[in-house]
Image (tube, rainbow, N blue to C red):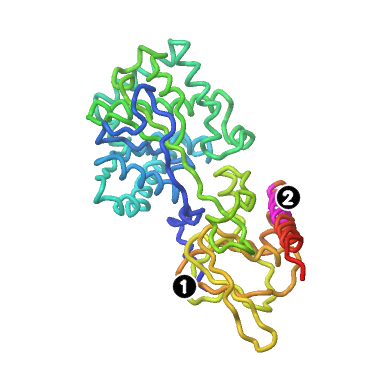
Amino acid sequence: MNQQASNPKQADQLGWPDYKALVGDVFPDNIDKGLSQFEKCILGIDLGARNLKGPRLEACAEWISNNFKSCAVAIADSAHQYTLQLTQGLSQSSAHEEALRCGQEFIETYRPIFEKHAEKCSFDFSLLSKLRESANYQSDKDLLNRLHENHTTFSQSAETFAQKYPQSLGISDQLFNELAESTSRQQQLAVSHLIDELAMFACLKQDGWPILIYPGMLTPLQEIIEGKHPDVPESLKSLVFAHLRLQREKVYFMSETADKKEELPESFEFLSGLSNDEWEQFITHTKGKSFKANDVLIEYGQDDRSMYILAQGKVDVFLHDPKDGSQKKISTLDKGTVFGELALLDGKPRSASVVASTDGLIFQLSFEDFSNLKNEDPNMACALLFDIGRVLSLRNRHMNEVVQNAPSV
């Protein structure tokens, strides 16, 4: 079985591969959520945001390609310097240089994702570091800075954004505060990031891009569009803002009675209580492995305490006949299925074989990985064990019902 490549540029893409983007809130609220009146849009890229990497970014690109003919991928590279100063303790000059490098790396890494959808939608990269050279950008930024200094309502909105900024980066408040030189410094840098992004969107709106697509909430921008900050640049007030929701495809436990995950009841869903971010955190405790058709993933009689999550492809399950050593195919599992969970609990040799019927990708949780998870995140480990136990109980109840309803002979 082939281990998936560990190229650093592909690291983000080793997360859960199936996300679907759905339009959420749209501002102003009198705009049709179908957004069919628009042909062009902006996709705002905050280089520190979790929702704009790997499979989540690909879900955004696919949704945009199905709804628009052209898109400006607006990369807030120079604004990223403020995040780097906060999270890595870099000096201003070092953070600026690294931020520009991150912007170029983003383009190199994710260009193939956008090119894949190029027949439907034309994607053009736009770097904030280049937009900053325009007079429109600088005048809008100066106005926003004056509003932050002199207008209480806008200042409070920006400060509230700054307080919540660590959440969008996936950084705990405690760590964020340790990295920041002081609370006021933290606030200052986060507000500077916000104002740079708002000025970038205002500049692009003046260049003819009417709607911003963003997989997250920008409350200050929402308030601007709702008319709560009337002194901001006119281009921001007339911008349309559409928030994308990213929905992770569900994962189900292997069933004894159904071959397809679509046939399984919601009660068989695996770790349904985890948020997208918690799920991605769980995935970091597993090993992503690609496989080819006919690869043996689990062998009958094998001593292996790993549990597997089928992320892509299909596999066949075979039972071993001890009389003649033959194997009988009993099920085909599709992507989004958990299998091998019993061995994680009891440590006994495998009771069936699992063979790949197509190329695909699995995430392996070994017993060692589980032990690490238990030490690092006991609540998540407990949730995993509870889920396995719950499903085993459901299966047992189902078998009892089958026995009770069996006809008498």
Highlighted magenta segment, given as a residue range? 380-391
Vertical arrangement, residue 200 with respect to residue 384, above or below = above
Q: On the rendered structure, is 282 left or right of 236?
A: right
Which comes before the other along the chain, label 1 or label 2? 1
Magenta segment's dominant SS is helix
- Within the image, what quadrant is residue 67 found in? top left
Q: Is residue 93 visible?
A: no
Q: Is residue 149 visible?
A: yes
**Residue at left offset 26%, top offset 43%:** 124
The amino acid type found where label 1 is placed reads Lys
Q: Residue 401: image x %, image y %?
A: 73, 58
Considering the numbered disc 2 on the image, is that residue within a helix, a strand or a loop?
helix
> What's the mark number on residue 292?
1
What residue does disc 2 label? 382
Task: Categorize mark 2 by other alpha carbons within 10 Å: few (<14), some (14-19), many (20+).
Answer: few
Task: Categorize mark 1 by other alpha carbons within 10 Å: few (<14), some (14-19), many (20+).
Answer: some
Q: How many marks?
A: 2
Of the pair 200 and 123, the residue shown nearer to us: 123
Q: Residue 19: image x %, image y %?
A: 46, 48
Of the pair 347 and 111, the residue shown nearer to us: 347
The quadrant of the picture occupied by the C terminus is bottom right
**Is 375 in the magenta?**
no
Considering the numbered disc 1 on the image, is that residue within a helix, a strand or a loop?
loop
The amino acid type found where label 2 is placed reads Cys
